[in-house]
Amino acid sequence: MNMAYVSATEGQSAGPPLPGSMQRNRRLCQWLRFSVQGHVEVLSGKVELGQGILTALAQIVAEELDLRLDQVRMIPASTAASPDEAVTSGSLSVQESGAALRCAGAEARHLFLEAAAALLHCAPAELRTADGDIVHADGRRSSYWALADAVDLDREASGLVAPKDGSAYRLVGQAAARLDLPAKVFGLPHFIHDITLPGMRHARMLRPPGPGARLASSTAAAAALEGRQAQLVCDGSLAAAVAASQHLAERAAALAAPLLAWQASPAAAPLPGQHDLAGWMRRQPAQSALIAASENGTAGAPVAATRSASYGKPYIAHASVAPSCALALWDGVRLTVWTHSQGIYNLRKDLALAFSLRPDDITVQHAQGAGCYGHNGADDVAYDAAWLARTLPGVPVRVQWSRADELAWSPFGPAMLVDLEADVDASGAVLDWRHSVRSNGHSNRPGRAATPALLGSFHTAQSFPPLLAVNAPLAAGGGAERNAQPCYDFPSWRATGHRLLTMPLRTSALRALGALANVFAIESFMDELALAAGRDALEYRLAQCSDPRARAVLEDAARRAGWPGAQLPPERGLGIGFARYKNTGAWCAVVAEIEAGQEIRAVRLTISVDVGTVINPDGVISQIEGGAIQACSWALKEEVAFNGERITSDSWDTYPILRFSEVPAVDVAIMPSAAPSLGAGEAALGPTAAALGNAVARALGVRVRALPLTAQRITQLLP
């Protein structure tokens, strides 16, 4: 759903090639605005999710325009002004928005030099730029700010102005303080949860007890709220309690909830058995397709053995720390929505479908949400706020989901099953590798279908049908098939995908999509094959990997972690994991040290990553650290629980995540590179999970092939 997805599904836009998102947002004024007040405003369509992207983009602009970082102002994304860059996802923001802004900055600087040269009666080449000034060697000068009204940026980029050469960088590649952190560190109002509007009303949603339940009667609940400064709003099976404050709304919801009468929908199918997900997935109808293959190298090679194994991951919740929140105002003509959605234009499209409005009559304004990433509840709660605002014209409505809403009703990362089989020669080297992945689709984001993909729209009286999740084209990174292709030089291999055509639990994009399960499976199987061959796991990988950047991260992480001879205390073990994210992104190798006590504890992660040209080293390290720590939580703890009727993991007690006291030490090394920049956000997730699984196997001699790596699963495997 990022620009790579748009290009893969809709083709390239007309006109000469331009870099990144500029291909579809070709006018310079869509990206930059120069102010006579002495700063430049940047209008990226990518949003800040806590990943530090606005800082990196500001560095790129400051670099191309020879500005100080404090002369660049990043404008929060809004459909009222920002370029449409689809969704902030896939670790592609530097590649898509950064490339566009680099081009826009270079072209804008060129235009300002031409304007200054005409003013100063000299050639543009005689001028230089520094901190916004445009200076001639003889002392004559102008500035971006003096010429701000004279230079017209309402024109298409030419694509003919070369950006600055990397050898001249002064800001790019240097650590820069995060623009978004001061407000967060000092607790200033910063998140969408902090926004207040005059006369604002607050709402709490009243959800069905399970996906298959429908509202039969709200009469008793509505009567209970009469005279209590609250009201019950219902449309079909969509219900909310509305009051003048959040506290009152919560109290009203608590009073009304047990009085709502629900009944099972005749069409509702029971949820699958949680503890037989693999069997359930094998029994479901599926759309099968060849992902990719290379089958030219095995003719005549003797096969010494054929080995196979199956690996799995459960449904995983986004478990955003701050429950999703949105505000909306309907003035009778226009709808304005404040949201922490990752795709403001896509959300606007679905809101227009849901409420039969023109997209131009809707403004979607981004505001940061704490712990917001992936397709969590951000878009759904925006629908809830818009629905209530339409019911209460002229009144701004704020909706904040409950923890149970967030854990039980946000889309889940789908459960996956990966079957691997390999033919090996007498030395244990792989001759032929067969990878089969089975899962629901990994994308159900708004903005793509003919009907809205928003939760609330499935529950109104005139409802829209729930949509079956799909997988993005492999050219856009894929979904379940992401990283299903091995990163090794196997003579022959084949990867096949099976997208399930039943979806009892709503699934969509969770960070890294299918890469978590595929990398966990591939790297676990590689360890199993190495063990069967009596070879060291690192040496076994390197012997079948010729990519110099892959070898570099593997060797660097192993060296720094003391692989394989590190002297460890009893019940500790090292494991290694590696992948190139999406097979086209960053290279990342992880060595995990674990302690196997009553539970598995991640002690230390040693990580080496190659992301090409680095914009902000601190930002890259933070992204890698964050991904690795989240992978620890997924690999060791997280699993959506459910019975035949409902999600049962709807609190932190029933859906535990990694605690701060359990966070391992993380040591990240960035490999030096002048190659094009690659995203860092999701590169560490798969390798970290694999490294943890391999460390458990080395420490305990037990191979756990299904996540999470809990004591219960390990105990079941012990002899």
Image (cartoon, rainbow, N blue to C red):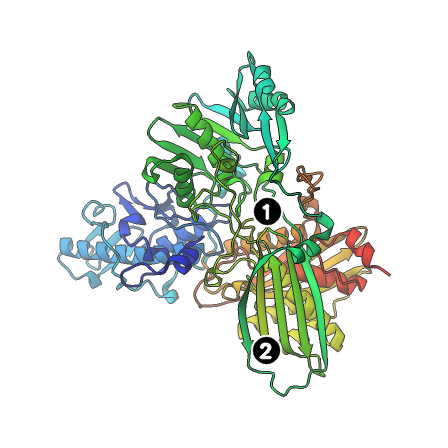
Q: Nearer the viewer, residue 298 or 33?
A: 298
Q: Is residue 39 visible?
A: yes
Secondary structure of the residue carrying numbered label 1: loop
Residue positioned 57% across, 37% down in the render: 322
Q: Position of residue 545 (x, y in %)?
A: 59, 76
Q: Nearer the viewer, residue 692 or 516?
A: 516
In this picture, residue 197 sits left or right of residue 424:
left
Q: Residue furthest bottom?
A: 300
Residue to which mark 1 is pinned = 412
Q: Position of residue 592 (x, y in %)?
A: 68, 60
Residue positioned 32% across, 42% down in the render: 81
In this picture, residue 329 sits left or right of residue 317:
left
In this picture, residue 41 sits left or right of residue 652:
left
Secondary structure of the residue carrying numbered label 2: strand
Q: Position of residue 608 (x, y in %)?
A: 59, 64
Q: Residue furthest top?
A: 227
Residue to which mark 2 is pinned = 492
Where, quadrant-wise, is the C terminus in this rendering? bottom right
